[in-house]
Amino acid sequence: MNTWLYLHAPQLLLDTQLALQTPAQQQQPQVLLAGSRVGARQVVQYNQAAAAAGIALHMAEVTATTLVAELQLRPYQVAHEQSILEQLAQLWYQDIAHIALYPPQGLLFEVASVLRLYGGFQGLLQQLQQRLQEWPIRYVVASGDTPLRARLLAQAGQSLLSNDADSVQQAVAQLPISASGLEPVHITRLQQVGITTIGALQQRHRSALGKRFGRTMTEYLARLNGELPMPQQYYQPPAQFSQQLDLLAEVASWQQLLFPLRRLLQQLEAFLQVRQLSVRALLLQVKHRDGQHTEQVIRFAHPVWQLKDMLGLTQLQLERQQLDQPALELALQAQRLEPRQPHHGDLVQASSELAAPTQSLGELVSRLQARLGEQAVQIAQPQRDWRPQQVQQWQLWQAATATAMAMPQLPRPLWLLTTEQAIELQQWQLQWGPERLASGWWDDTPCQRDYYIAVDQQQRQGWIFHSEQGWFVHGWFT
């Protein structure tokens, strides 16, 4: 038997907006209004401060503003709320594969296959709540042996979690007919003939209901009882990550944007986790009042996917940046996605290593670049050239690639002098050589030298050479 879970968030858009505000702002009475023209709109969502002041659902705008003079009004945007619903589906896709969207405020989960994994409804609900730590939204969750029963219970505010089909059926039967989800015209006609609960509707003969109310009514009852399956359009995460947030008020600096950015990065972490991907670069885009955009690219020297790593490195880089104009919207795009590479370690490690794991080179470079800038962190890159001066070049970390040398490994020192120093051969004792170089004629920097390894009178081992100009020391062995 299939088991369904339905989540209903009646204040989804407003709760998400409140989460981006300061505690002082959250205490202000706020409502979202729906309607075609100003003055004729109605309240569709309101916060606790507005409820305490007497604001109610479907209250006219004029009445609400008369009742609460300092009431904050914002238009209800169904497209934004549906976008938030998709973000929640992406967040929970890590735990449940079968999620159907019921815009703009509902999600349906097929949970029969995961209940045992989480130890029942309570364990599953704890997992869902854990994902919502950064999302303080109000919601009701109910279960059912059919999708419609679970949906009706949740939308009616009854948080019933049970595997007992009889208990679920009895709870649904007690719901008022106004909570049936039928068309308003059908609800009115049913009430006129004395049918005031869903249970009373189920007791009537379907043939009689079909004759009076049409095929819609018989199909509704069949779906309610599970006799007619409800085809579900299950959610599929997008191939690329791109999300944005409406900031509601202007934000003057990149540092102040870190709080809403944390929300977007949490969604990105869920996106990467589902696909086992990492990211190397982020594109931040803010929209200003005049419609112009400002972009900031955040690059990482090593692949990252966890919220704490992305946020920490982004914060370090944004500390060096200035925002020329206040921002009204914040958007985030993930760039340079790559498959996540598993980390293999020793099966047996010292206890000290387990207690204090070492930082990888990539993590260190990422932090240095975030603090100092990309140009400040470079790496010596080997080149296919015999001349000591051209055997390596300094390149940016991101541009460097492993290049195999097409020559044998010769005994050369790591410490080369910036300028060769003239020496007297009598003060040196030759140990090895010569290594004869005759190269560079193609780029106007010819090199014709005989290199030797030698020891001076202080027993220092040096790398010396002889050319037409005499004897010189070029480097030291350590």
Image (cartoon, grey):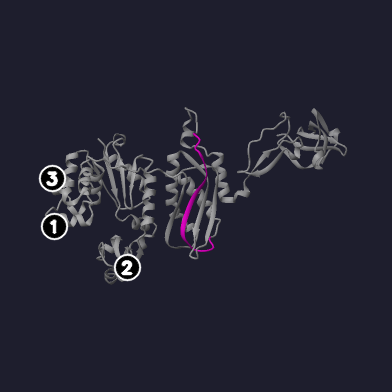
Q: Nearer the viewer, mark 3 or mark 2?
A: 3
Extreme-left residue of the structure: 194
Q: Pointer 2: what residue?
A: 71
Q: Pointer 1: what residue?
A: 192
Q: Residue 267 at what x, y percent from top left?
A: 42, 47
Q: Read off the magenta span.
A: 323-342
Q: Nearer the viewer, residue 443 or 83?
A: 83
Q: Quadrant of the N terminus?
A: top left
Image height of 39 relative to 368, above or below: below
Q: Pointer 3: what residue?
A: 205
Q: Residue 116 at what x, y percent from top left?
A: 29, 34
Position of 28 with respect to 465 (left or right) is left
Q: Dot 3 lies on which element?
A: loop
Q: Quadrant of residue 119?
A: top left
Q: Nearer the viewer, residue 289 or 42?
A: 42
Gap between marks 3 and 2 measured at Cα: 50 Å
| Residue at the image position 38 percent from the left and 41 percent from the top | 94
The amino acid sitting under disc 1 is Gln
Q: Dot 2 lies on which element?
A: loop
Extreme-front residue of the structure: 211
Which numbered disc covers residue 125? none
